Amino acid sequence: VRILIDQTRIDDRSYYEDLDSEDEFAAFRDRYVTVPGEIYLDGNSLGLPPKSTLTHLDSNVRDGWGSRGIRAWMECDWINLPFKLGDTVAPLIGASAGEIVFADSTSVNLFKVVSAAVQLNDSRKVILTENGNFPTDEYVLQGISEFRDDLEVRAVSRDNIAEALKDDVSVLVLTHVHYKTGEIFDMEHLTKTAHKQGSLVVWDLSHSAGAIPVALNDCGVDFAVGCGYKYLCGGPGAPAFIYVRQEIQSKALPAIAAWMGHKAPFAFDSLYEPAEGIARFQSGTPPALGLIALQNGVEMFRNLKIEALANKSRLLGDLFIERLLAAPKMAKIHLGCPRDSKSRGCQVSFEHENSYAIVRALIKRGIVGDFRAPYTMRFGLPALYTRFVDVFDATTAILDVINTREWDSPEFTKQVAVT
Amino acid sequence: VRILIDQTRIDDRSYYEDLDSEDEFAAFRDRYVTVPGEIYLDGNSLGLPPKSTLTHLDSNVRDGWGSRGIRAWMECDWINLPFKLGDTVAPLIGASAGEIVFADSTSVNLFKVVSAAVQLNDSRKVILTENGNFPTDEYVLQGISEFRDDLEVRAVSRDNIAEALKDDVSVLVLTHVHYKTGEIFDMEHLTKTAHKQGSLVVWDLSHSAGAIPVALNDCGVDFAVGCGYKYLCGGPGAPAFIYVRQEIQSKALPAIAAWMGHKAPFAFDSLYEPAEGIARFQSGTPPALGLIALQNGVEMFRNLKIEALANKSRLLGDLFIERLLAAPKMAKIHLGCPRDSKSRGCQVSFEHENSYAIVRALIKRGIVGDFRAPYTMRFGLPALYTRFVDVFDATTAILDVINTREWDSPEFTKQVAVT
């Protein structure tokens, strides 16, 4: 579905108001905690809290930990939360029940699935990835090849992935939506190309899950990981997820073998025997508080069609891009993401040599985007709580900040650490 | 300091009331959430919540995540919580500021430090541990040796550790206080013996931190890990900690290299360059909610002397043991932990062929201990919230449950999964 923009009304706020009034997801915004007067466009980095999360977390901590102590694990069924949350997320990314578990961080989960992949495909010694993949993905692979000196990381540019898939590639590790450009890889094509010549495939879905449709099962993806605190709104540092294709679960073994991945954790056997199924990709005791906070974020998506959510985000992005590109006097700003929404994740990016200061000046105005070195400003557009008028107001502010050089003040140009 | 028990008053509840009235830590109990009528003796498995944790967690989630979104990482200084909590815990275990970081789970942290140790000491190929160490410790080592087939795990019995320290041992991995028996290893002797013949040493302090004195620096320990949800009262699945001795921090590299361990995480460089110091032992984004909940648990220990806390726990344990051992008709119960409190952690253990049913019958009465297969019942005695009268009432109930065979009912004997 391509949604056409009415270019004649692109500078008219009432156009955006009209779109909000027709938006089938408009009512969801009120279910999230928003700050009055603020336009939060950083849901690609940290999603907003569902209002229900605040009460749910508080009451669960009181009723569970506070009233039941250790028994809360069983009486509140916290022990199964990693799997229940996984099953709730599964339809968003084209997976089946029993293929996903929440555990640890994206980085640690990536370590687990890549270590499993290289053990499954151990006659090959190359881990192939994109040069410019999200840094933690690159670092995890570098750490593995440092620890296992028979393994080698080969990082090639985005356009050369397919041809780099030689018969020495054990596993291909890619991020589905690029963190900086928002560009979407062709998962189906690359997965099938990799499989054809005998490589396994790992996808990092951190910028995809809850943002755009993903078809893990249909593409035959072997392993995936993803983030709980971006579009899934699980809270800062929320547990991440692991997907392992049903057919290889009983053969795949992560290098991190730990008690919650054991077939009988409470038998306290000395010998590690991995659980059947996805449970073996758990490691330590599940982070219950993080899982409880994540629950409402994930539940918000139940019965929603991810394609419809993505369509709204695409239109938000198209409007954001087209309005800025159409504006006069914008010579120094460049589009940093695909213009075609079919190739773009749930964010827009722009490049400007003063992006850092511009982003900070915008934050001062209550418009929260983020900066990625060296020149990128990013704005996330999650469908459940982003309004069309937010796009109008944010782009108006961006134009103003740039055209008036409001950013050109030591208050904004002085570099401080930002996440 | 040996505290002598007045054996003549051991069956007299007023004796325990007197001890409570003289207890310098008595006032702390009111700062924890306790369930009226319940005697919670499972703090060795999951510590009780400080009352302040409930309000602190709720207000931080609202003020931080709810009002500041992504900016909470900096504005609330969540980004430094892993180190601040580490520095708060350091004096409890004889470490220095800058030697501890909270991250991930105990299992994942153990993987990180052992992987660092074997890389530091890579001419040797044996990982030595105790047969019967806590299962997740055994599993983690087995997983590493599966992933790195040049490495071998050698598990020997408790008494044979010292003589198994041959010149092929890369790293010795032990748990300071045994999870089942509560027995304390001689950290100083074993660490020095290991160092003398060139092995590195990792201690798991899960049952030690916040329970008994530990002297990491004085013993020259290389690496340690420990649990946040037992004596530190961080909540179910709380973040765990890692200790790395100052002198080896700049040489030690965990196999899990990830962005929060990078020297400049927000520079988004493609090449992994480890942070100076303990930060390189972080991996993914810190689990902020878990860290916030942990904060109050850890703060409770500030300015307290761990030796004084341990002395109270030792006396609680001595009374628990001596009263049960002195009771008539207790033929079938055996002491499962050292009788001498100098050799015992902050728990007592007993063995009985019907321990499982006995523990469940006690829970029905509101006396919460736990069961460890096949025959052990465990009772944790944290000094900050355990009263002397709790020991009297719990031992009275144990005697009653056993002597009346109250446990001998399908309600209690039927096995269900327990944590």
Image (cartoon, coloured by chain):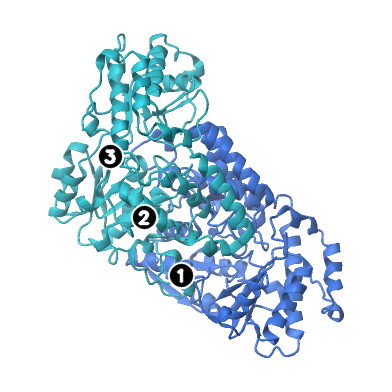
Chain colours: A blue, B cyan
Q: Who's the residue at 59% across and 40% down the image?
A: A60
**Residue contact at pointers 1 and 2, CB within 8 angstroms:** no
Q: Which residue is mark 3?
A: B307
Q: Chain of mark 2?
A: B
Relative horizontal placement of residue A206, taking residue B132 as reference (left or right)? right
**Residue contact at pointers 3 and 1, CB within 8 angstroms:** no
State which tag comes first along the sequence, 3 or 1: 1
Expressed as whole percent of the image width and height from the top left, the position of residue A35 reads 69, 60
Q: Amino acid at mark 2?
A: Asp
Q: Quadrant of residue B279?
A: bottom left
Q: For label 2, count other residues whose C-alpha is less than 10 Å away and answer few (under 14), some (14-19) or many (20+).
A: some
Question: Distance of mark 3 from mark 2, alpha carbons?
Answer: 18 Å
* Relative depth, front residue between A244 and A385: A385
Q: Which residue is mark 2?
A: B87
Residue A399 visible from this viewpoint: yes
Give SS at disc 1. Answer: helix
Q: Who's the residue at 35% across and 40% down the image?
A: B135
Q: Which residue is mark 1?
A: B265
Q: Quadrant of residue A400?
A: bottom right
Q: For label 3, count other residues whose C-alpha is less than 10 Å away and answer few (under 14), some (14-19) or many (20+).
A: some
Give SS at disc 3. Answer: helix
Q: Who's the residue at 41% across and 46% down the image?
A: B298
